[in-house]
Amino acid sequence: MTADQSVATARSDESAETVVEVRDVSRSFGDLSVLEDVSFSVEAGSVACLVGPNGSGKTTLLRILAGLLSPDDGTVSVTGEAGRAVGYLAQQPVFRSQFTVRETIAFYGRLVDAETDVAAILDRVGLSTVAGRRVGALSGGMMRLLGLAQATVGDPPVLVLDEPSSGLDPMMTRRITDVIAGLRQDGDAVLLATHDLRSVERIADEVLVLGRGELVASAPPETVLEETGTATLEDALEKLAGDDGGVQAGIRGGDAA
């Protein structure tokens, strides 16, 4: 397959449980079409990284998956037995500054129909040592970790994360990436939008490339590189979607079965 053909979804484990199904999702804001016929699936215990230029529709798609927006057309289904189907981390999480870290998670725990082990949640994201610190005294990186902790309250089978390491230093970025890798090992399905392609190379089982609202690639990172004839994901992304978010002629996402 050449770079001017579709990059189709590749699956290494056909027995894995599919927990997210997105089928033909479209969304417009007035006359502006943001998403057009997007289809893909995500399996339990996997990380799918959504990448693409600014304005390609990533945040809109994540908000639809989190139930904060409704698609104009198409369907989104999430399977799982948890009371909370999807945990969501916004790009800029906001919490009550006077609450402590422990109180913040306990507060969100009271909002879900499930017992919440606050200590275990904080340990999972590496915030146990600052459990008594007030939110207003947290660094930007710790705020993102608190956002990750909040997203896991209620043990949702799917975590939707919007730029969880945006603007952070390399050390904190790696720490957050390690936490996400741990969530995958625990069996969670993680879908995250990011511009940090190094993190994508480290943790992605699947790369979903958006260009002007169209899914133009859905495959493991190594497959994307091979089928675009590129050495880095940065080069592959530019070839598939371009800096302006445009879709090159002939490149279309394959069936995201």
Image (cartoon, rainbow, N blue to C red):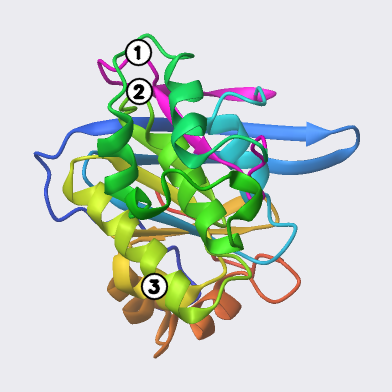
Classify 10 Å Cα crowding around label 3: few (below 14), some (14-19), many (20 and above).
Answer: some
Q: CA distance from mark 1 to mark 2?
A: 7 Å
What residue type is disc 2 on?
Gly
Mark 1 lies on a secondary structure that is loop
Q: Is residue 81 above or below residue 185?
A: above
Q: CA distance from mark 1 to mark 3?
A: 30 Å
Q: Is residue 77 magenta?
A: yes
Residue type beneath disc 1: Gly
| Mark 3, residue position | 174
Is residue 122 located in the magenta-colored stretch of the structure?
no
When the figure is inspected, residue 162 is found, relative to residue 227, above or below; the finding is above
Tag shown at residue 154: 2
Say whether disc 2 or disc 3 marks the residue closer to the N-terminus. Answer: 2
Give the residue at the far top of this rendering: 113
Report if residue 98 is visible in the image: yes
Between disc 1 and disc 2, the foreground one is: 2
Residue at image mark 1: 83
Q: Are marks 1 and 3 in contact (CB under 8 Å)?
A: no
Secondary structure category for the residue under label 3: helix
Residue in the foreground of this view, choosing between 12 and 169: 169
Task: Please provide percent x and percent y for residue 71.
Answer: 65, 25
Decide if residue 37 is in sight here. Answer: no
x then y, percent, for residue 107: 50, 22
Q: Nearer the viewer, residue 238 or 70?
A: 70
Closer to the chain start, of discs 1 and 2, is 1
Give the mark nearer the N terminus: 1 vs 3. 1
Residue appearing at x 62%, y 69% in the figure? 241
The magenta span reads: 71-96
Q: Please, what secondary structure does the residue beneath circle 2 have?
A: loop
* Residue 49 position in % (x across, y down): 43, 57
